[in-house]
Amino acid sequence: VQLVESGGGVVQPGRSLRLACAASAFTFSSYGMHWVRQAPGKGLEWVAVISYDGSNKKYADSVKGRFTISRDDSKNTLYLQMNSLRVEDTALYFCAKLSSGTNPGDYWGQGTLVTVSS
Amino acid sequence: SYELTQPPSVSVSPGQTARITCSGDALPRQFAYWYQQKPGQAPILVIYKDSERPSGIPERFSGSSSGTTVTLTISGVQAEDEADYYCQSADSSDTYRVFGTGTKVTVL
């Protein structure tokens, strides 16, 4: 299983960025997928989840209304559209298939760094 | 918002037992998961569904649950176990996931 994030970079506050996560070697379309972030020197923070069929999406309060999670199963790719970025959004962003009660497999990418700075 | 609380740090001598707690109101109703994270690396799942151990994880890692507290136990700690450990679970309505505050395990 491989998850590879891309799209990170340096962006000014208020601007937008779209992250992508390319999945391979597992049945991407069968699983809900998550974004998790980690600010420099800080702990893990769950950001968002999308259901296996894309019909259900949930967000952390800290990003609700600014970030949008989506998926394209034809490309085995997960996305995170980030708008109105803030300095506090600076973090390493991981995509992950997290273990659950029915699906114990747990897979993470290596992350893509987003830096919000003027 | 829902929170999972862990002690900031635990120190243990090699060969001894480390216990890391995680407290949260929804833990009696939601499974807990434990992750190990070393510097510069993605987290690795060491316990799922409160007490199950993924393949490839050493038997010295175990998990337990009692009421609103779950515990990760590392028996016979080795130097390579020095890392940050995070619990993870869902809120009571299973709407979103949350990670614990994290515990740094130091092997003396």
Image (cartoon, rainbow, N blue to C red):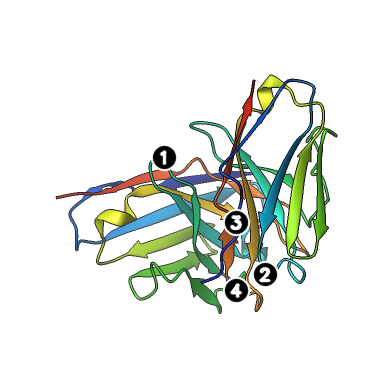
Mark 4 sits on what residue? A53
Q: Nearer the viewer, mark 1 or mark 2?
A: 2
Kind of residue at badge 4: Asp
Q: Earlier in the sequence, mark 3 or mark 2?
A: 3
Residue farthest toward the left in the current orientation of the protein: A118
Looking at the picture, do discs 2 and 4 lie on one chain? no
Q: Amino acid at mark 3?
A: Thr
Mark 2 belongs to chain: B
Mark 3 against mark 4, which lies toward the viewer?
A: 3
Numbered badge on residue A41: 1
Q: List x then y, in percent, for residue A103.
A: 75, 60
Mark 3, secondary structure of its residue: loop
User: Residue A98, position in %: x, y?
Assistant: 64, 56
Question: Picture quarter containing residue A19?
Answer: bottom left
Q: CA distance from mark 3 to mark 2?
A: 10 Å
Disc 3 designates what residue? Answer: B5
Q: Earlier in the sequence, mark 1 or mark 4?
A: 1
Residue at x 83% of width, y 50% of height = B52
A7 with respect to B27 (left or right): left
**Above or below — where is A8 with respect to A100?**
above
The answer to whether any part of residue A85 appears in the image is: yes
Residue at x-position 43% and y-position 61% = A79
Q: CA distance from mark 2 to mark 4?
A: 30 Å
Give whichever of A63, A5 is nearer the camera: A63
Which residue is nearer to you in this view: A29 or A39?
Answer: A39
